[in-house]
Image (cartoon, rainbow, N blue to C red):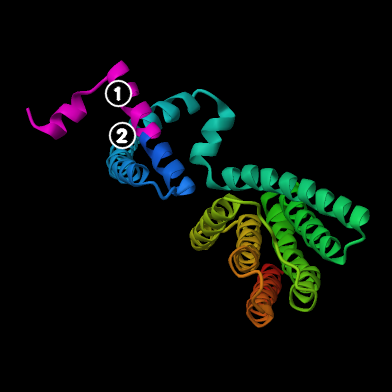
Amino acid sequence: MKFTDRLKSVRGAKKAALIAVSILCIGGAVAAAALHLPDLWFQILSYVFYALSALSLAYLIYVVICFVPKMKTNITRWAQNYEFTDKLLHDYGYRTVAFGLVTWAVSVAYALFQGTLAVLSHSVWFGALAGYYLVLAFLRGGVILRGRKGETEEEKNLLRIRVYRTGGILLIVLTLALSAAVVQMVYANRAFEYAGLMIYASAAYAFYKIIMALYNLVKARKQSDFKIRAVRNINFADAAVSVLALQTAMFQAFSPEADVSLYNAVTGGAVCLLIVALGAFMFVRATIALKNQG
């Protein structure tokens, strides 16, 4: 029997043991890289762990690839038994609103957190961040909740177009709060900061946000519901700000003594202009749609 066939045939306790060993090998490689002792035997052991961790990572990827389709089938079958989860799976608009409510709650919580820091530390920087996340939360909540009103479908559609236009205006207002944060970055040398390895997690999350925002922005263009388009545009603006936040955090972590004010000014200005352009586009498009409806 071939080696790959043997791997495929591993089941139950043997597979669990292989996964556990793989995780231990990867953990050993990370520990070896972190300790970096000069002892010869330690270096030899480190290279052994590096080789084993590479094989282990390959095996874990193989397990995930084999497991995901089965897991997806089981989750789909389970989700179809309940109305809420069934709608999440099959109704794109419903899913957009549901996850939008989650991100709205996170924005509110983070705005309150930054506001508390601003009051306790008398910091303009935290105050600017609190203002940004507060406007963002108000924008998301208004788009999601107001778009549900209306008696007839025609009334609902008109209201959603108005909400879309208001969302565009508020995106422009959002830029004012963001501009205050950018000014603090440039002239007061303030930056987003993440402790230790959190910088790498934040980088991964920022890239995930921008990729998903772009994907959903393109997908939302096929939707006739202006509320869904508004939510996706807001998420895209938020993702753009995440890229700016990541840049300042990377500079702070890896080049704390360097003068990066010019880079932050250019990126911050570009993000602000992008959000203003997006808000203006939403306002103009909604105004044209309202005229066509009338």
Q: Is residue 168 above or below residue 12?
A: below
Q: Which residue is mark 1?
A: 15
Contact, CB < 8 Å: mark 2 with mark 1? yes
Crowd band around label 2 with a 10 angstrom C-alpha radius: few (<14), some (14–19), many (20+): some
Q: Which quadrant holds the N terminus?
A: top left
Q: Which residue is mark 2?
A: 63
Extent of the magenta region: 1-24
The amino acid type found where label 2 is placed reads Val
Considering the whole magenta stretch, tell me its main secondary structure: helix
The amino acid type found where label 1 is placed reads Lys
Give the image quarter of residue 236. Answer: bottom right
> Which residue does the image show at 30% across and 23% down from the upper left?
15
| x and y percentages locating residue 280 in the rendered image | 69, 76
Which circle, 2 or 1, is nearer the viewer? 1
> Which residue does the image show at 82% across and 58% down from the upper left?
130
Secondary structure of the residue carrying numbered label 2: helix
In the image, 41 versus 166, the foreground residue is: 41
Query: Residue placed farthest to the front in the image?
Result: 39
